Image (tube, grey):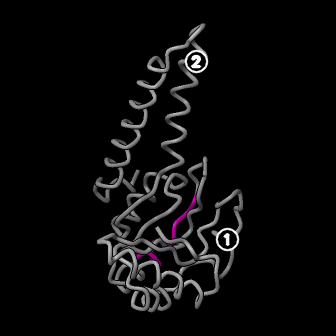
Amino acid sequence: MVDTAHLSYRDNVDATRGFTRRAHELGLWVEAELGQVGGKNGHAIGAHEPGARTDPAEAAEFVAATGVDGLAVAVGSSHAMTTRDAELDLALIGRLSSGVGVPLVLHGSSGVSDDNLGAAVRAGMRKVNIGTALNLAYSGAVRTVLDGQEPVTDPRTYLAPAREAIADAVAELCRVITAPATLEAR
């Protein structure tokens, strides 16, 4: 993952092209970010401001100039969201998907409702990042065990339920992103 989206467009292209060239020499797949996804390092700014969304023409130019294999785009989500109220621009996802020629990546998927996330995948998203949702599931399971038993000193007591909580969260995400379009009708 190359993330130099905070740089000017030209500097982002130059840096990403260099990283991509070196990574491809080693046989690695490269994902880059274009646009202001927001939520990084505690900064929520970006995801919902005018002009923060990834422009389809610029995205196609960026992919061609850098040679990246996947592109994370700004379409309304934000990193590190603990609520699920982000509204994605599905029409923009469709335009990006048809114009860039590489798989699209959604950062900040943890903040997107099930219905909106399923629609995003049907519109063209091919990779979804849900780190915050997994962190919440894991931490919640650990807290439940630690709050319910005195004294807990063996980490296996709380790590097994935490791993199970992550597995359950991933299984639910897989159900959401593969559900038929009728899911939105709920």
Identified by mark 2, the residue type is: Leu
* Disc marking residue 81: none
Sequence-wise, which precedes: disc 2 or disc 1? 1
Q: Which residue is mark 2?
A: 146
Frontmost residue, 50 versus 37: 37
Q: Which residue is mark 1?
A: 46
Which residues fall within the magenta stretch?
A: 86-93
Image x and y of residue 32, in percent: 47, 74
Image x and y of residue 28, in percent: 33, 69
- Vertical relation: 50 (above or below) 83: below
Mark 2 or mark 1, whichever is nearer to me: 2
* Residue at screen point 64% across, 61% down: 40
* Residue at screen point 43% across, 86% down: 66
Frontmost residue, 167 versus 14: 14
Position of 149 with respect to 61 (left or right) is: right
State the image quarter where residue 171 is shown: top left
Q: Secondary structure at mark 1?
A: loop
Position of 149 with respect to 130 (left or right) is: right
Image x and y of residue 150, in percent: 60, 7
- Vertical relation: 7 (above or below) 114: below
